Image (tube, helix red, strand yellow):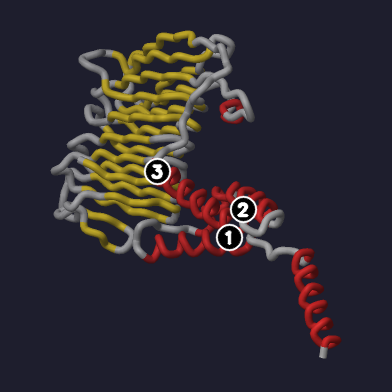
Amino acid sequence: MMSDLGLRIYGTEQRTEDDRHRPRPSLFWPLVLITAGVLLLLSNLGLVRIAWWELWRLWPLLLVFAGLDILSRHSGWAGAVVVVIALAVVGWAVYLLYTNPRPTRPLYSLSDDRLASRQVSEELGGAKEVDVELRMSVGELHLQGLDRSPHLLEADLRYPEQGAAPRVSYRVSEGRGQLLIESRRAESDAVGLFLQPTGESWQVNLSREVPLSIRVKPGASSAVLDLSRLWLRDLSIDAGVGRLEVRFPAEGRDMKARIEGGVGEVVLRVPEYLPTRIEIEGGLRSIQVGTRFVRQGDAYETAGFASAESRLEVLVDGGVGLLRVES
């Protein structure tokens, strides 16, 4: 009997020793499943729209999960701590994704770039309508209408002294003008590992006297487009990374706007009495609209839109972040 008891004690000690050396189960895939479950829950509750091909933007979370998994294998209590940290990281990432745009400038800059200024003005030159294209790499863009000016364009373009001034070109052909303002800084220069260059700052003022077709590529920038006093025909925005705010005119026959992609907050300010339709295609966005909008499938529409002559139609295609519609 003593022999049997000794064997049982020895066996228990042996199993305990084996358990100590047994590899701990990986937490990587459980963390991935938790993240996917959170996103599916938010989607089912109608808080976000998910296009799964947009989820590649969250790939850095995989590195975070892998690091936490490695830490958890070195300590028994670390597993519970890792789960708590992982949930906090997921919550923090989702919060930033839908409430805060990526800043266009670092909190602390090691760059000593100072801004030079280029003042630009262009006459209409007989144009009856104008196509406007603005291409910025990184910085801040402000667009608004001119006050009682014969010019098509008056702009203050600020750029780093160590860099090249933005390129400006304008030509008129058969009554149609084509205006281009383009940054000469590559978008890849805007993001560094430890050092981020100073961004540009553009104040662009356009004529209210001719219909405008406006295309904007803001890059990694914060853009405020006040179109409320412009004669807007159509608007196209290839959104980048950062906050985008657009204020639309109160009047305009069949105004059309298209916003593609982008990561960050998008704010659309629509006049209260302007019949409007906003259609959402794909993307991973949290959507906030006023009570005057009625949801119809993937679109939000105000009363009287179908029969209105002066109206606004907006298509938001893809993107990640918060979409907010205000008056």
**Identity of the residue drawn at 64% across and 30% down:** 193
Assign the C terminus to one quadrant of the image.
Answer: top left
Mark 3 or mark 2: name the one nearer the start of the chain: 2
Residue 4 found in image quarter: bottom right
Q: Is residue 191 above or below residue 254?
A: above
Residue 197 found in image quarter: top right
Q: Position of residue 42 (x, y in %)?
A: 40, 60
Closest to the camera, between mark 3 and mark 2, is 2
Distance Cα–Cα, label 1 vs label 3: 31 Å
Residue, disc 3: 259
Circles 2, 1 touching at the beta carbon (< 8 Å): yes
Image position of 146 (left or right of 41):
left
Residue, disc 1: 32
Name the residue type under label 3. Ile
Assign a secondary structure to mark 2: helix
Name the residue type under label 1. Val
Q: Position of residue 217 (x, y in %)?
A: 46, 33
Image position of 108 (left or right of 178):
right
Q: Position of residue 209 (x, y in %)?
A: 24, 23
**Identity of the residue drawn at 17% across and 46% down:** 309
Q: Pick whichever, 196 or 15, lies toward us.
A: 15
Distance Cα–Cα, label 2 vs label 1: 8 Å
The disc label shown at residue 237, or none: none
Residue 268 found in image quarter: top left
Residue, disc 2: 65
Name the residue type under label 2. Phe
Assign a secondary structure to mark 3: strand
